[in-house]
Image: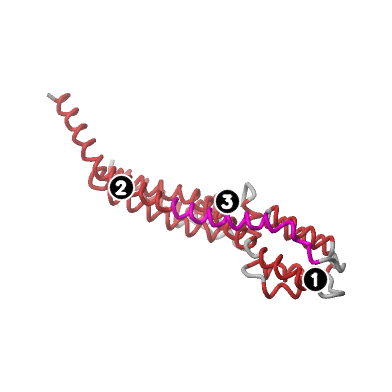
Amino acid sequence: MVPAIFICIFTALYVCFAVEEQIGMTMAEITVDNVRTGILRKLNSNGRWEKLNNIKKNAEDFLKRAFIVGILGGALLCLATLGYLGPYSMVFLLIGAAASVLIAEAAINNAYQKWQLDMVQGIPALIDFLPSFLETPGITTRAALEYTIPFIPGPLRGEFGNAISAVKRTGNARRELMLLSARVRHPVMEAVCSRLATTWDASISPDLFSDLREEVANVQEMAAARATTKKKGLFVVVVLIGILGMGLLAGFPVISNVLNSVSSSFGA
């Protein structure tokens, strides 16, 4: 019986790790590659590919970091419950590995939201400086924007710089500016890009964005409120993790005693 089990285990390990297919990969490598490809395909679905493309990052980087977080969390739970569950506590490692996909999805969404917020936070400087340049006689919206770009903070400066370069290559200001608006996906950004595109080569009055100041102020207030909410949410998560850990440490002995009592009563 024992030799048969040994032969089966040896054969399985040999097939998985030693036998190479014509493509030069073992069965284990093929399986891991298929699982990885399926996970990356899931992470790139539901509009997340566009978000990753907008922030110029890829899903694999998020997956690697999420996998580390998931495995570390699973390992901590495994160690905390090892004395009560024994080898069954290893299931927490599998749960942590599976949870890494959800962690990666949340991280991608949060990264895009942060990029989106950073982009929008550069708009107040735009609507403050650009009208000042428009007051100069003969200055077009295009020239005023070029003069304004050095004063714009955050990633919005580089994005407008890239848009202007693209317009110089293609000659299609509306297309390039609306593409930028579509990437940011924010109503204030859409309004700004639409007005810039409409008046691109025209000399207009400085009140181009005067009616957007209230909306921009609301965006700034929402950003401050979101930052406060995020800090509170992080505190709540830390507290919940602490409560869960305490429950695991205190609950398993109680459950073990109850099961022992029940088994003893049946044995009696």
Q: Is residue 101 above or below residue 166?
A: above
Q: Secondary structure at mark 2?
A: helix
Residue at 87%, 74% in the rendered image: 138
Residue 232 belongs to magenta span: yes
Magenta residues, start to end = 206-233
* Visible residue check, residue 181: yes
Magenta highlight on residue 167: no
- Which of disc 2 and disc 3 is earlier in sequence? 3
Q: Nearer the viewer, residue 1 or 98?
A: 98
Where's residue 239, x and y in %? 35, 49
Cα separation between marks 3 and 2:
29 Å
Measured in 3D between alpha carbons, the distance from the residue under mark 1 to the one under mark 3, in whole angstroms, is 45 Å
Residue at numbered disc 2: 245
In this rendering, which labeled residue sits more in front, label 1 or label 3? 1
Say which residue appears at 57% left-offset and 56% top-offset.
223
| Amino acid beneath label 1 | Leu
Q: Amino acid under label 3?
A: Leu
Q: Position of residue 15 (x, y in %)?
A: 45, 51
Disc 3 vs disc 2: which is toward the camera? 2
Task: Please tell me whether the stretch drawn in magenta is mainly helix, strand or loop.
Answer: helix
Which residue is rendered at x = 84% and y = 63% of the image?
199
Cβ atoms at labels 2 and 1 below 8 Å apart: no
Quadrant placement of the N terminus:
top left
- What is the crowding at mark 1: few (fewer than 14 residues within 10 Å), some, or many (at least 20)? many
Q: Which residue is mark 3?
A: 43
Residue at which label 1 appears = 134
